[in-house]
Image (cartoon, grey):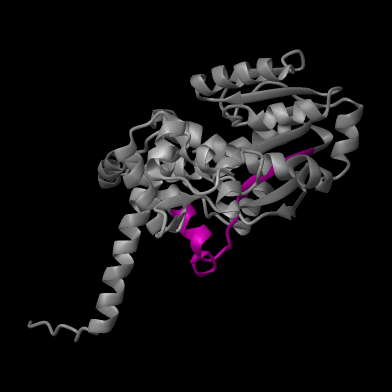
Amino acid sequence: MATVEAELDLEKLHAFVFKAVDEVGATLNAALVVMGDRLGLYKALAGAGPLTPAELAERTSTAERYVREWLNAQAAGGYVSYEADSGRYSLPPEQTAALTDESSPAYLPGFFQLALGSVIDSPRITEAAKSGVGIGWHDHVDHVHEGCERFFRPSYNAHLLTEWLPALDGVVARLEAGGTVADIGCGHGASTVLMAQAFPKSRFRGSDYYAESIATATERAQAAGVADRVEFALEPAASYSGNGYTLVTMFDCLHDMGDPLGAARHVRSSLAPDGSWMIVEPRAGDRVEENLNPVGRAYYGFSTLLCTPSSLSQEVGLALGAQAGEARIREIVIGAGFSSFRRVAETPFNMVFEAKP
């Protein structure tokens, strides 16, 4: 049977081609942002006023020819400002906050580093997609592990102590008096250490299945001076040690688990009767059309390259995905026997839930 090709709208075709060109530039820019971060180019530009490529290269002990090309790419993307008359470049204050201030919740280099690591690993994910096998979180390049913490840590610093924990039912008072906390899927321990610094009378136990993350977390706790009340253990989410916990936390990891229902059941069994489980998950609506926006696009991308392969590499392999949404998280929690589940806080990137036995 002959096929009839739809008539092309050339204007729409041209618009899509130029959109694609912009996408290629954005893809390359992930590497350029990581380059600028690692070489100290953004920090050298911050507050320095207009600089020539040679001046920036001198300040950063880098090669001027590379720096000039990098600056032009950054100017074309709107990351730095360019003065045509003087041939100098500067970093606007908004970009300064987003690219150099590690205390700002808008700090972005970790986001780019995570994306770059995902792209580097994408050929392996492409091969895995043919058979449906998984690739574990531990099996990614270091950019993924380091970038993930650097992306989420500013948000935890900005919101965990001031908004998220206070939104839970009586948890802050219990931790101030002296409670016990299990931080599951703790990664490099950013969330665990932050809570331990805030609640010196409580004890904290972080766990993760990746040995290198546990080693890094242990070093971080020692450096922060909280090692006397924090311990980290190499344990899976469905069988971590301890019981009677005041609080169990999971930060951006439940959807990565192969058996989130099994993990949820174990959380319930490990909590004190009046304990709380705080679940922090990527922000998402329950329907695909609710997530067709810039945040959803980024998270669907990470979900394809990181989260779904991670879950598929584990037993059960439920693969909730980074855009699971509140309804699916609720289904897991209630299915595990919890009596209550509610959303208690949110940011542009996260949703925060509390579950009670």
Q: Is residue 214 visible?
A: yes
Residue projecting furthest to the front: 86
Q: Can residue 264 be seen in this view?
A: no
Q: Where is residue 150 in the image (x, y as percent from the top left)?
A: 55, 36
The reply, left or right, for residue 246 in relation to residue 264 is right
Query: Which quadrant would residue 233 be assigned to in this image?
Result: top right
Q: Where is residue 49 in the image (x, y as percent from the top left)?
A: 54, 47
Q: Residue at the spot x=19%, y=84% of the render?
A: 6
Tell me, yes or no, whether the highlighted magenta stretch contains residue 290: yes
**Is residue 194 placed above or below 71 in the rendered structure?**
above
Q: Position of residue 246 (x, y in %)?
A: 81, 31
Residue projecting furthest to the top: 228
Q: Residue at the spot x=56%, y=20% of the render?
A: 216
Q: Residue at the spot x=38%, y=39% of the render?
A: 54
Query: Which quadrant would residue 154 be assigned to in this image?
Result: top right
Q: Residue at the spot x=52%, y=25% of the render?
A: 209
**Is residue 159 placed above or below 262 in the rendered structure?**
below
Q: Where is residue 137 in the image (x, y as percent from the top left)?
A: 44, 33
Q: 71 or 340: which is nearer to us?
A: 71
Where does the magenta region start and end?
276-300
The reply, left or right, for residue 234 in relation to residue 173 is left
Q: 117 or 70: which is nearer to us?
A: 70
The quarter of the rendered structure image containing the N terminus is bottom left
The quarter of the rendered structure image containing the C terminus is top right
